[in-house]
Image: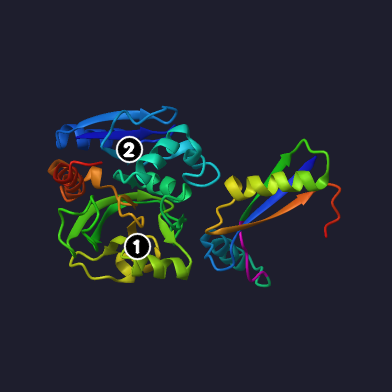
Amino acid sequence: MKTRVFVTLKPSVFDPQGRTIVEALGSMGYASVHDVRQGKYFELEVAAATVDEARATVSEVADKLLANPVIESYRVEVDGDDGP
Amino acid sequence: MKFAVVEFPGSNCDHDAYHATKHVLGQDAEFVWHKDADLGGADVVVLPGGFSYGDYLRTGAIARFSPVMARVREFADAGGPVIGICNGFQVLLEAGLLEGALLRNRDLKFLCEHVHIRIERTDTPFTAGAVAGQVLRVPIAHGEGNFHASPETVAALEANRQVIFRYCAEDGELSDRSNPNGSVSAIAGICNAGRNVVGLMPHPERACESMLGSTDGRVLFESVISSIAATGVV
């Protein structure tokens, strides 16, 4: 089953890379882009019988390894899951 | 006195730590490979600097799952002195043996220079031989040393006297200018609640010989040697 994990810095955490990108965009003339937050994107192929099972496994993996809960939060997407 | 220097794939200050403890301070020292099942009967564990696992994912994030880290955790839980230097500090934070996280430096630059740090507390095995307020001149070499924790965690670290080192000016004064990487409260190093696990971004092991520009880092190693000799326990 195809799953995706999006990891981003928590809103309270300063993102110097995002700041640098937004400043570069400003100098390129894109003044309308006033905020950028850089994150990480993972694609995980998971053997699972159900969407819920895949979601549970991937969430556990994100908690333990893919994201650092001190500074980051994450969102999981599973193919075939229309969401709550 | 035996020091174990843990080597992860990508550690590159392991030989600096080995040299400082073995050749400069004249102690027994041994490398411990990250897949090793034990710490070789060491009295002190050093997690050295470097780029374990190429800093993939996050600094220290993969290394914390190395087999030897389970032994390091047991050693720390039993009160054994553990010091994490630079990447070793990052590993201790990822492992949850210390609280907080390290972000990219404020200006995104890799910083390689000598800085001054102030010893805030002397009730850890690695600072017992120092004087509170003592200023050390030591090198830093990192791209992700910007210490971060929630305001609640920072307040708890301060209240529990767990902030052990702060970046400062030569005279010990704190200022934004003397904080090289943007660390919250100028924090350069902290300890755990048990005070036996210490982590810091600067490299005391590279400041043990006058030929290298400073001998100020020796006090950390001399402190732990004296602490263990005095108590006879590890």
Q: Position of residue B225 (x, y in %)?
A: 17, 42
Looking at the picture, tell me which residue is in the foreground, B112 or B146.
Answer: B146
- The residue sitting at 70% across, 45% down in the picture is A58
Judged left or right of residue B139, residue B66 is right
- The residue sitting at 31% across, 39% down in the picture is B45
Q: Position of residue B145 (x, y in %)?
A: 40, 55
The residue to which callout 1 is attached is: B187
Q: Which residues are magenta?
A: A33-38
Looking at the picture, tell me which residue is in the foreground, A29 or A57.
Answer: A57
Quarter of the image that includes the N terminus of chain B: top left
Q: Secondary structure at mark 2?
A: loop
- The residue sitting at 40% across, 40% down in the picture is B74
Looking at the picture, tell me which residue is in the foreground, A6 or B40.
Answer: B40
Q: Earlier in the sequence, mark 2 or mark 1?
A: 2
Alpha-carbon neighbours of circle 2 within 10 Å: few (<14), some, or many (≥20)?
A: many
Q: Position of residue A39 (x, y in %)?
A: 62, 55
Residue B13's disc number: 2
Q: Are marks 2 and 1 in contact (CB under 8 Å)?
A: no
Look at the magenta stretch and give its main secondary structure: loop
Judged left or right of residue A35, residue B24 is left
Of labels 2 and 1, the one closer to you: 1
Q: Position of residue B53 (x, y in %)?
A: 49, 36
- Compared with B38, B69 (above or below) is below
- Amino acid type, mark 2: Cys
- Residue B74 magenta: no
